[in-house]
Image (cartoon, helix red, strand yellow):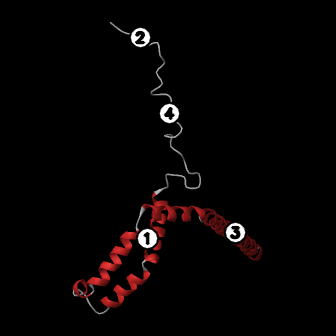
Amino acid sequence: MATSSTSPDTSSTDVPKSTAKQYNLRNPLPLSAPQEQEVKLLYYKRVRAHCAPEIKAFAECAVNRTVTATWVCRQQRLAMNSCMLAHAKPEEEDRAREEWFAGYEERRRVREEDLARVEKRRAEVIRMMREDEARTRAAGK
């Protein structure tokens, strides 16, 4: 025996606006793998910049040491690692991603200028080759 419902089923069609996914237009996703790699490089650079004094202290301690740097420079190593862990957060990665997107238009403009310069040079080389061929033909007759 089948029962019919008189009330409309709204559980699957109506999504409250508060739970709908909001897209950040300044930071669209997904990026390609090379673009993600560029974002990661920016992210690591930013984290290293935050911890530059700790990294420098560890590097100075580890000079002329190999295996013994692990024990001798333990304080500096722990300070460096804790600093990097403190700054290696998703928020920092988001900032790096926003920085990458902020520079996207500039990188695109530079790439287009480079392509235009290459095309201009290519046309110039082709013109010079044709002139040279014409001179060679004229000299041979």
Q: 10 Å neighbourhood of mark 4: few (<14), some, or many (≥20)?
A: few
The disc, 2 or 1, on the residue closer to the chain's N-terminal end is: 2
Circles 2 and 1: CB atoms closer than 8 Å: no
Q: 10 Å neighbourhood of mark 2: few (<14), some, or many (≥20)?
A: few
- Quarter occupied by residue 81: bottom left
Mark nearest the camera among 3 and 1 is: 1
The disc, 4 or 1, on the residue closer to the chain's N-terminal end is: 4
Q: Is residue 87 above or below residue 77?
A: above
Q: Is residue 141 left or right of residue 64?
A: right
Q: Is residue 104 left or right of residue 125?
A: left
Q: 10 Å neighbourhood of mark 1: few (<14), some, or many (≥20)?
A: some
Q: Tag 1, which secondary structure?
A: helix
The disc, 4 or 2, on the residue closer to the chain's N-terminal end is: 2
Residue topped by disc 1: 44
Q: CA separation, marks 3 and 1?
A: 45 Å
Q: CA separation, marks 2 and 1?
A: 59 Å
Q: Amino acid at mark 4?
A: Val
> Where does residue 25 sit, x and y in percent of width and height?
59, 51
Badge number at residue 126: 3
Residue topped by disc 2: 4
The disc, 3 or 1, on the residue closer to the chain's N-terminal end is: 1
The disc, 3 or 2, on the residue closer to the chain's N-terminal end is: 2
Q: Amino acid at mark 2?
A: Ser
